Amino acid sequence: MRNKKRLDQYQPIKEDADHSAIKDLTAKIDKPKQISIILEYFRNNIGTSLDAAIATHILRNSVTWIICQLEDLGMIQAINRKPDQHTHRKAKHYSANRELWHHGQPQQLQFNFDE
């Protein structure tokens, strides 16, 4: 009986339906320093999320969330997709070096406001 946990530790307390639907995207990052460690790795190296996880000793799940956030912030970009050296499956290789990024032609959006 001593090790029995309370029910509210397993289930979220629902105050209202909107409150329970809020998703915290930063919940997967254990420490705020991890994002800077991953960014520094991709500034110096080109690699996959697995390469970054092995080199930095950060959980791969956390690395994947951090990469997603860094892409959204525009700080890293996938520069190619080729077989990974560890798994031999195609994987995205990322870099924070802007000289290696693909800069396509900017799209001009044309709007017709006269109608």
Image (cartoon, grey):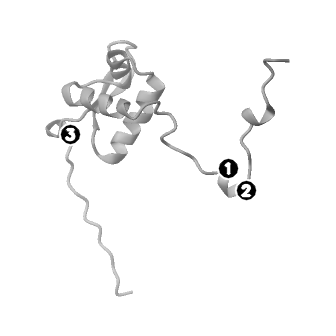
- Under mark 1, the amino acid is Ser
Category of crowding for the residue at label 1, using alpha-carbon neighbours closer than 10 angstroms: few (below 14), some (14–19), many (at least 20): few
* Element type where label 1 sits in the image: helix
Which residue is nearer to you in this view: 28 or 30? 30
Q: Are marks 1 and 2 in contact (CB under 8 Å)?
A: yes
Position above or below: 102 against 31: below
Q: Position of residue 16 (x, y in %)?
A: 73, 56
Q: Residue at x 35, y 31 (%)?
A: 33
Which residue is nearer to you in this view: 99 or 102? 99
Residue bearing the label numbered 1: 20
**Disc 3 and disc 1: Cα gap in Å?**
39 Å
Q: Residue at x 27, y 42 (%)?
A: 75
Q: Position of residue 107 (x, y in %)?
A: 25, 60
Residue bearing the label numbered 2: 16
Q: Position of residue 15 (x, y in %)?
A: 73, 53
- Under mark 3, the amino acid is Trp
Left or right of 39 in this view: 25: right
**Disc 3 and disc 2: Cα gap in Å?**
44 Å
Q: Nearer the viewer, mark 3 or mark 1?
A: 1
Q: Nearer the viewer, mark 3 or mark 2?
A: 2
Residue bearing the label numbered 3: 101
In which quadrant will I find the C terminus?
Answer: bottom left
Q: Residue at x 36, y 46 (%)?
A: 72
* Element type where label 3 sits in the image: loop
- Under mark 2, the amino acid is Asp
Q: Position of residue 18 (x, y in %)?
A: 67, 57
Whether residue 114 appears in this view of the structure is yes
Residue found farthest to the front? 2
Examine the image and state in which quarter residue 36 appears.
top left
Residue found farthest to the bottom? 114
* Element type where label 2 sits in the image: loop
